[in-house]
Image (cartoon, rainbow, N blue to C red):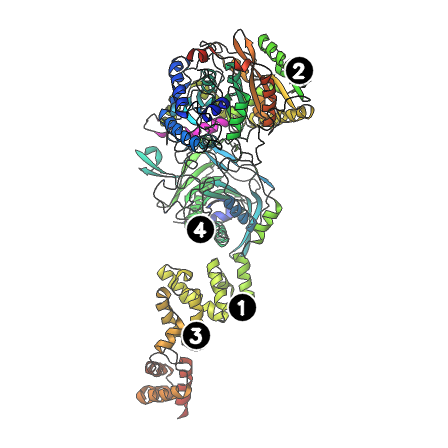
Amino acid sequence: MTEAATIPAALDRYEVVIGLEVHAQLLTRSKMFCPCPADYTSAAPNENTCPVCLGLPGVLPTINQQAVEYTVRTAVALHCDIPAFTKFDRKNYFYPDLPKGYQISQYDLPLSVNGHLAFPVGGETVRCGITRVHLEEDTGTMHHAGDVLQSATSSLIDLNRSGVPLMEIVGEPDLRTPEAAREYLVRLRQILMYIGVNDGNLEKGSFRCDANISLRPHGVQELGVKVEVKNMNSFRAVQHALESEIERQTGVLDAGGTLVQETRGWVETQGRTISQRSKEQAHDYRYFPEPDLPPLRLDAAFVERMRAALPELPEARAHRFREQYGLTAYDAAVLTDTRDDADTYEAVVGSGVPAKLAANWQSGDVAALANEHRMPLQHSGLGVDGLASLLRLVDAGTINGPTAKELLAELYVAGGNPEALVRDRGLAQVSDTTELSALVDAAIAGNPAAAADFRAGKQQALGQLMRAVKDATGGKADMPLANRLLRERLSEQ
Amino acid sequence: MTPRTITELAAALRDGSTTPQALLADALARVERTDKDLNAYLSVTRELAEQQADAAARTLGDHPDTASPLCGIPVALKDVLCVDGIETTAGSKILRGFKPPYTGTAVQRLFDAGAVCIGKTNCDEFAMGSSTENSAYGPVGNPWDIERVPGGSSGGSAATVAAGSVPYSLGTDTGGSIRQPAALCGVVGFKPTYGRVSRYGLIAFASSLDQIGPFTRTVEDAALVFAAIAGHDPCDSTSEPRAVEDPLASLGAGVAGMRLGIPREYLGDGTEPGVRASVEAAFRVLEAQGATLHEVSLPSTDVALSVYYVIAPAECSSNLARYDGVRFGNRVERASLTDMYLQTRGAGFGNEVKRRIMLGTYALSSGYYDAYYRQAQKVRTLVSQEFEAVFKEVDAIVCPTSPSVAFPMGSRDDPLSMYMCDVVTLPANLAGVPGISVPCGFVDGLPAGLQVIAPRFEDARVLRVAHAYEQATDFHTVLSPYAGKAA
């Protein structure tokens, strides 16, 4: 791909205008309008269905209270206004994965409006308006015998996903670069996961994104012709699709052509977008108020309860970590990446481990092990308490770094009590000066050549002597102390 | 044996003079004798009925005092009401063979009370019509004159009660589909307040207008059935949570001192003289009972029909989208998805249903929504407000149920003249208010109906006024020729 060369050039001539629409499935126990489990991935096809989510004749929807709460929680986290009155509408279109022939959604009176999300991109703060956050239901899924529905000889429909609560977050066209678009999604996903409403899985489609993108010459107020891009299932895909689309649109405009308003799909394997449907082919969804559901009135007290119950959000938490624990901006960001990470960190520090020590271990060895075993610390055998206990032993000087590292690796999956193990296996480090001094003497006596080299000014020769001390203690020596004692003894003569 | 009412049968079941099984056998025999002519049934559910009759007999044997008055008594259900495992077609070819895997709430409440379901009754396809001529399974004959329509859309449910086959049935009323056929068949037909009876399990025509209600031979029976099926249902978000006022408590309280309103717009030029005469005679009866009558005005009546024929088709165009051949009902196999949709729906729906789907699709389309749907909703609000204003002046409204008596089959072949049948019933649906039709006389041997309408949730008042009128007259005791013949 050639974005690296063409994008900056294009940005020179045109202003890029990007607005994102995110669909996020809510982590409710049951579906949006029926009591079926909302978990659609672990059940056999069409197992988690009932007459309501199958759209059988005669059924009626009932609103999932938890889904409303999660949407309001999201809305307050995104600084939205929550109107006192909201309603559901029907969006009518025919498709085999839509059992009723309409999707229950929200049209002109959404659950929330007028929010924003601010985040840093390349050292500057980007503020993207949130037009609205509304609630709707997901469709079923289809499995085609063939590539696409129209050419498939047969298709299978799984309606486990039909009726899963889906939140649509519509962003304002405030984004100006693909990087900003990507960062917006990263931050939005992080917030949704922090507040416990979405699991953030782009690959499985529980967090999905469509992008609207247009170009206009710098200084022009009027928006250019908008293209909607779909089928992007990773942050990387979003960025690449937008870069590719900028390149394509620039090409058309530079050649004196005009763009058409259309929907295009990102084809990852080809690295380009292809046209799916033109404006003329767009559906007329014939929205009208859902007569089976009375309007919702959300009283201010309810909204305030949702607001009060909101956890500390990642940006605020990172800021506090810098202030309270003296962390670098980088460490603070890493340690607040997920709510679990941040909770872990605070639990460890709260148990008496110094802030910097906890930060180094958590973002270093612990993160590596979590990645290696594909198992976050909270679900590991060691657990948060185990890590805290291990790091207290390090802080107290009871065990040395290498021992701690080995223990951590051993206990991460298997679990165990670090204090008991250190005691039972005699892993406590040798930090008694008298004992270490004797071992230092023995090391010098046993490695006369190295000692002579060091005295002659060859600093590296100390390594061999250090190893000798370390080996003599079975790796348990307090190495900083051993280092000091060796240097003292070697400088004596 | 003369057809008897629920009240009479409940007593007979308790004094040992009959059994649920005997009542079932009698009902099935009557259907057997009459239905070749009437075509009131789309299916007879003998097996289900036998099980229910046996269960009801046990209940009555064990707990005769606490058993519901409906226990052991046969009932017929309009074929838009879902019953688990029983074919439910809504009078449409597209649902031929469809067996719902669940039972709707109102029907379940009847079953819980011990009702014995003998069958599913014929109706206009998806309840769209006023004559039952739009059924995909052939028209229903009126038991008073087999060449005439029974009204609609609940024609089968009205006809089977008028024929004396069952003491009661359930129908649905979206624009008059219970009250108008009740009037044309000479029985009682009650449409409760919108939201009073759960719609869960009712195959939707127009969600904001549909309501389930009973056909009976007496107002007391209507109150009994209403009491059994009414009340909040968590499965229907539009059902009313507040408790149901016991309609039997005030049933006999009479109309002395009541102010009754006669909307001048409801007795217009379209009203047949015979119907007008019957209804005006009914007014005198009510006056004699101590009520005072007052002329009132519902000025938007003339536009209510237009409003109805925007809103009902709009909702139906969406409600009927699920009949696409993908998951249930009948499919016409075609190579492409679009062709399958077109052929399935083209072959599965009748003309009136297609007409309303097209009307509704148009009314909701981009660019037309404001002019049609939104405007209709505004006028609908106006219609409701006019009812509210009138109910500040009077306790209830009395008027004809239908401008005409039963008309000959095939005589109203243009849609507009058919739509005019509901001109005095559909405003009640638009406003969500309860309405009832009681027999109020005969015009050349054909029944006429008196309609009583009260404010929302004053269902008990509707029944009380209708009962007072009924008790002062004997039109409800006159049996149709089929009820006589079958006996």
Locate residue B283 relative to residue A252 in the image: left or right.
Answer: right
Under circle 2, the secondary element is helix
Residue A137 x, y percent position in the rendering: 46, 40
As shown in the figure, which amino acid type bears the numbered disc 2? Ala
Q: Which residue is drawn at 50% across and 46% down?
A: A66
Q: Residue furthest top?
A: B444
Q: Which mark is residue A393?
A: 3
Question: Does residue A57 lie above or below A405 as drawn?
Answer: above
Q: Residue A200 carries which label?
A: 4
Is residue B210 in view?
A: no
Query: Which marked residue is nearer to the observer: mark 2 or mark 3?
Result: 2
Query: Which marked residue is nearer to the observer: mark 3 or mark 4?
Result: 3
Both marks 1 and 3 on one chain: yes
Decide: few, some or many residues near mark 2? Use Cα within 10 Å; few <14, some 14-19, many ≥20.
some
Q: Which of A345 and B420 is in front in this view?
A: B420
Q: Which mark is residue A326?
A: 1
Both marks 4 and 2 on one chain: no
Q: Which residue is drawn at 38% across and 86% down?
A: A436
Q: Which residue is drawn at 35% across and 35% down?
A: A149
Query: Which marked residue is nearer to the observer: mark 1 or mark 3?
Result: 3
Q: Mark 2 points at which residue?
A: B288
